[in-house]
Every structure is written in C-alpha cells, then in structure tokens.
Image (cartoon, rainbow, N blue to C red):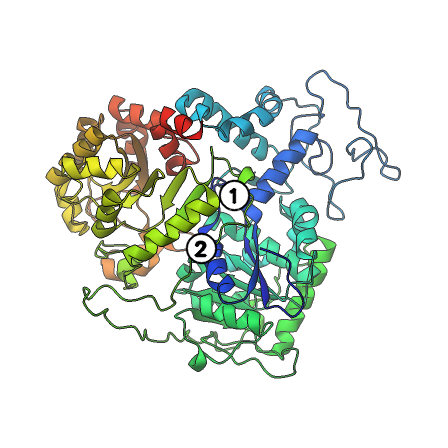
Amino acid sequence: MGTATTSEARLTLIHPPVSKPCEPPAGIARLAGYLGARGVVCDLIDANVEGLAFLLQRAIRGEVDAGVGLRGAGSRIGPGGADRREYPPGRGGSAPVAAGGPGRARPPGEAGEGWDATNRDAWTWRALRNLERHLRALRSPLIYSHPDRYRRAVADLGRILARLPHRRRVVLGLADYQDGELSPVRSEDLLAAAACPGRNPFYPYFVEGLAPRLVAGAPPPVIGLSLNYLSQALCAFALIGFLRGRYPQARIVLGGGLVTSWRRRPEALGALYGVADFLVAGPGEDFLLELAKNRGSVKSDDDRRDGGEMLALETSPDERGKPLAPSLQIAAPDAPAVHEARATLAVAARQGVFASREAPASRERRPKNGPAPGRVRPSQAGSWPGRSGVEEPPEVVPSCPDYRAFPGALYLAPGRILPYSAAAGCWWRRCRFCPETAERNPYRPLPTERVFADLERLTREMNPVLIHFLDNAMSPALLAALAQHPVGVPWYGFARITEQLATPEFCRRLRDGGCVMLKLGLESGDQRVLDALDKGIDLTTASRALWSMKEAGIAAYVYLLFGTPAEDREAARRTVEFVAAHGAAIEFLNIALFNMPAFAAAASGLTTRPFSPGDLSLYVDFDHPRGWSRGEVRRFLAGEARRHPAIAAILRRTPPVFTSNHAPFTALGGGLISRRS
C-alpha cells in the first residue's frame, strides 16, 4: 500500500489466524478501499495465510519451534537418519537449532515439553517429505481433477500442522484452532490468551514475521483486527497481547462479524476492558477514518455518521491531553484500572508467561453495578425511494475493495480468488433462527452498475481465476444481470431456491455468464419442516431447480440442517430420500447439526440450558419438542444419512476442509486448466 510518512493518516489492519488460507480477507480489503479513497494509508496484513505459511516453511527447513522438528516425529532428517544440527553453547544440547543459524523465537522458560523425539510417525514423515509438492499442487489446477490426490495433499498439510510442537493441548489445522485448556467463548480464557501470547503456536511468526513489518516505518498509531470466526478468537487475543507488549502506545481496535454477534453479551464483553481500546460492532468505516486522521482520538457519538456501535472505549487522555469522549460504550472502568491492566499485559507479553489465573482487566475492576447496556443509535436511513421497504441505502457509501497488498502467491488455490460483496443483509430475511431476521438487519444492495464497475476494476488489478460472491443470498436481480452481462471470470455464490433457478433457459444463460456453482440452503427435504422454518422453499420448485442447474452445467452445493425443532426422525428420513433421489443433480453436500442461537431461545418457547459454560457462547441447548435429541440426531447422521450410497458418493466428491471454497475448482476441472494455459 506504500510507505507512510509521519504526517500521513495511517493505520494497520490485520486478519488474524485461523481461517481457510485460500483467498484474501474481504473485510479489511473493504475497509482499506474506503479509507484509502479518503487519504488514509492502510497497511494490510493477512496474518492467517502468512502465519500458516511461516509454520509450514519452518517445517520444511526443519526449524520448527525449539528446533526438535515435528511433535512426535523425531529429528529433521527422517527415520533412520542422523540429526546433524548444531547445538548452541549454554543449553547443554537440549534445544537443537538449524545448522549454522541461531535458535528460533521461543518464549523464556519453554522447552517444547510433551515431545518424544524417538517416536517416528510414518504418516507425519511422509507428509513432511511431500510438503513442498503438496503446496505446489494446491496452487495449480490439475490436482482438483483428482479427488484422491487432493484429499491426500490436504490431509498431509493438516497432519503437519497438527504435529507441530504446540505449548498446550492445541489442535491446529488449515481451517481450525482448538485449545484443550482455553475456550474462545470464555472471556476469562481470551484474557489468558492475551496475557500469555508466547504460548500461542503463532508466537514465532508474531516475532519474526509480523513485528518487522510493523516497525518498517513509524510505529503504527492505530492497529485494527478483524475477528469473524471462533477459530480466530484465541489467536486474535494472543496477538493483541503481543502487540500490547511491543507497542504500548498503539490504539487497538477489535471488530468483525464475531464481535458484532457478541454485542448481545455486554456483561461478558465488559471483562475485555484494557485489552482492546475499542470493540466495534457493525460498520466501522467512518469510525476508523476518524481514528486514523486524529491519530487515535475520536469525537463523541453525536458527531459520528456511521452505524457502527462502539461497545467499549477507554476513557483516558490522548496525546494532546484532552479526554477521549466515550462513544456508544458499555460502562467504562476508571482510567487507572485500564492502565494497570495494560501494564500487566505488557509485562506478561514480554515474559511469555502467565503469572496468574486471575486475568488482567478482570470483573473485579469493573463498576460494582456491572456494565451498562450499550446504547444503540437508531438508524437514520429510511426506506429507499422506489425500492421495497426492506431495502435501505448504505449508511456508509462503500468504495471498491483494495486487495493489492495481499500476498497472492501464498494462498492455497490455483490462482487468485476475488471475494466480493454486492449487498449487506439478506433480501429474504424471514427464516426462523437466522441472525438477519432476529436483528432486523436491513438489506442494502449496491447498484448493479456499481457492482459491474467494481468487478471490472478488480479483475483488471488481480487477474482472478474465480470470483466469490459473499452475499448472504445473491438477489434475483443480480443473478439476472450477471446472466445478461458476463463478467468474463467464473464465479459462484449463495442463492435462494426460486422459480428463477427452476427455469432451464435462465440457468443456461447463467452458466454462459460465468456461473460455475451455486450454494443452496435447502436445509430439509420435508415440506412441513421448511414451512415451519419459514424458508419460502417449495420442494417441487427445488427439484426443478436442481435438474435445471444440472442440465446447464452449474454445480449445486446443497446445505442440509438436521435436528431443528420442527424435525423428527421421519422428517429426517424424508430429507435423505430427497437427496438420494436428486443425487445426480447434487454435486456437493454440507450436512450440519442444528444449534439453537442464544438470541432465539426466549422466542422459541422451548426449555433451554447453557450450551457451554462460556459467557460469550452464541448458542444454547434445548429440549427437543419431538424427542429428537442431539445424540439421536448425531447417530442418525453417522449411520443412515452418511452411509446411504447416494449421499456417501456426494460426500466423497465434496472437498474436505476447504469445502465450498475449493469446490468450484473441482467443478471447473479441465476448464480451469484451459483458462490458465
């Protein structure tokens, strides 16, 4: 994005690990486009793809963490080979390093515990030997036409990451992060992750890969993190703890889809004071613009224009000695408590050890009466003239996303993928248990002319092999426009099953317009269940749509949801029968178990209980009104559903781990090869 001078408005935006490393993060690219068009220099860092690539490259070089190699895999040479690495003086030969080089970044007091250097695992060694070949293969088209080779490559990469010498009971994968000691839905555990970043598997990347980039110019005055998935939460807070220790003067902003979901739990969010300066729920473009141009200061909420909700804001003096005005905040703690928490985090981050189980900025430091409810400013945008009542103009007029700063060569895909959002919200917005329905989020589509102008510019800049539409559901109007005006690049996205897709001629024009795959939320093959969920789907229309898409050459990626309150075993069997009858028309399949959203618990009329002990949990458990318990649903899925020959065949075609992100390449097959040749 260019090097900023000290006089320029500047901020750093980071996408933390872990999420699928196959395409650049759309959230911070959208922010960079908006801010860059208004004179703010944005340094974009995809710490997810960079961090995973860093760990895999160290595995290739045999420099994994404490230098021993892979967890349970013995030396770097392989079975039967000698370890020829040099041992630095003063360590008694206990921590080997790469020959001729210094030891790699490692927090004090950590020695790679839990290792068995004599245990040589055949699968791990085979995966390590083939690592570079697998990386090259996943970045070329050919492997996507060979499912067995593809599955082997993905499984081997996952094996290597899982066997890295993590500090605790951590399971790290290409798209997942699980910690046996810390939970991403417990605020106390998020604070523990922030207080001890040295225990995170990505700590070496933070030190050797991320930090040098942050100090290449002037220290960043504002650092924003985009948190969208639970698999990112613990790593994001570990990164915040690291940043606090290295750059104590930086203002840290935490936003993204997960923070927006957490706004319903203000009592838990209050425990996170002192870690991030700002927790932003919803749109944050104008807030970040103000923050960057004022080098960490913000105006009061009455003067702000965007719809972003400030959940927490530190009330401490800025560099000019003026107090920062709280803006849409939960009750902020007193400034000394905040600084005490920050100091504790900074010391812990430098030491790499967690001194106390009582996390900094704990509940004891909050006001005795607890956090006040967050103020939500009513939307000032009414219905758009000439449009339906559910559509509203954007509160913030977006700019074209900016993907130029991302390292395209690192992503695990056979070319660049262009993520693009043509609308915010959902044009249907009626489904039960859907956040869009519960939150009454308005539907805000971009004008079609704007969409095509953005895509023309982005395809010219990126030369993508695939466009990924990120809309909750692509509108019929957008689909019709894409069918009439091809964008010149294969594309896919989520769409609702409508009469439009049940028309063979329209599907043929859609395929000619570049559509290679559509994701369809069928959910159930029982009409009574669909009606109870208010899906607006008619199974007869769904059948015609699937066959029309099949005839046109558009792959159908179908999503099923089992265990909803309206379903019983017989309804589940009807879903299996529907899928089996349409097996030839369904290319890929996602089978999921229903989780009751916490926000819907009261309206459901069901007996509920906590789904997990986490105070940030987004779901609750419930007594199924038809006795269709989660255990019974799981057994049904593992038996009758997944073992049905027709369903098993579809699941074998469905890419593991990367799922719908890589499925279009499988659907394209030789067509992608011909495009790149």
| Residue drawn 19% across the image and 40% down it | 568
**Which residue matches tag 1?**
177
Q: Dot 1, how many residues are within 10 Å of its Cα: few (below 14), some (14-19), or many (20+)?
A: many
Q: Position of residue 452 (x, y in %)?
A: 33, 51
Q: What residue type is labelled 2?
A: Pro
- Sequence-wise, the earlier of marks 2 and 1 is 1
Q: What residue type is labelled 1?
A: Tyr
Whether residue 649 is visible: yes
* Residue furthest out toward the right: 89
Mark identifier at residue 206: none
Tag 1's secondary structure? strand
| Residue drawn 32% across the image and 41% down it | 593
Whether residue 562 is visible: no
Above or below, 341 relative to 517: below
**Which residue matches tag 2?**
401
Q: Which of 185 and 155 is in front in this view?
A: 155
Which quadrant of the structure image shows residue 492? top left
Query: 662 left or right of 84?
Result: left
